[in-house]
Image (cartoon, grey):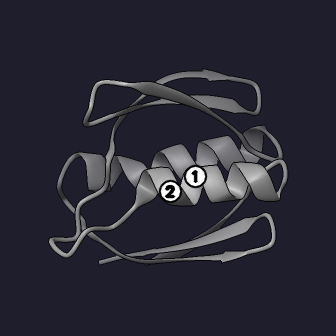
C-alpha cells in the first residue's frame, strides 16, 4: 500500500521524513499521534519526545493518521519513504 502526504512546506516534509525513519528492521520512531489540531499533528516518538508536524490541510492529516495507524498497531511494516519537494511518498506492506 502506498500513499502521498503533502506537508505545509519542504521543511515540514524533511522533519516528517526524519521522524518516520525506517531502520533495517522496518520500524518507525513514531509511537503514536498525541493530538490533531486542524492541519497540525503532534506525534510521540520512541524516546518519549513529542513533535509537531504541519501538513497542507486537514485531509492530509486524516490520510496520514489512517495510513500510519496499522503500522503503529504492528499490522503492517513501512517499506520505503521518498520526498519530492513538500510531498512524502510512504509505502507499507
Across and down, in percent, residue 2 comes to: 51, 77
Q: In the image, is 38 to the left or to the right of 36?
A: right
C-alpha separation, residue under disc 2 versus residue under disc 1 = 5 Å
Count numbered badges in the picture.
Answer: 2
Residue at coordinates 23% horizontally, 61% vertically from top-left? Answer: 27
Classify 10 Å Cα crowding around label 2: few (below 14), some (14-19), many (20 and above). few
Is 92 or 49 nearer to us in this picture? 49
Answer yes or no: is residue 49 visible: yes
Classify 10 Å Cα crowding around label 1: few (below 14), some (14-19), many (20 and above). many
SS under mark 1: helix
81 to 51, vertically: above or below? below
Across and down, in percent, residue 30 comes to: 36, 44
User: Mark 2–mark 1 contact, CB under 8 Å?
Assistant: yes
The residue identified by callout 1 is 16
The residue identified by callout 2 is 18
Say which quarter of the image contains residue 52: top right
Residue at coordinates 74% horizontally, 44% vertically from top-left? Answer: 55
Amino acid at each position: 500500500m502506498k500513499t502521498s502526504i503533502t506537508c505545509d512546506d519542504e521543511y515540514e516534509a524533511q522533519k516528517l521524513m526524519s521522524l518516520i525513519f525506517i531502520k533495517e528492521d522496518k520500524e518507525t520512531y513514531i509511537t503514536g499521534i498525541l493530538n490533531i489540531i486542524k492541519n497540525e499533528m503532534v506525534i510521540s516518538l520512541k524516546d518519549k519526545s513529542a513533535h509537531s508536524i504541519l501538513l497542507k490541510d486537514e485531509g492530509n492529516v486524516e490520510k496520514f493518521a489512517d495510513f500510519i495507524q496499522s503500522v503503529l498497531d504492528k499490522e503492517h511494516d513501512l517499506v520505503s519513504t521518498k520526498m519530492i519537494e513538500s510531498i512524502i511518498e510512504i509505502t507499507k506492506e
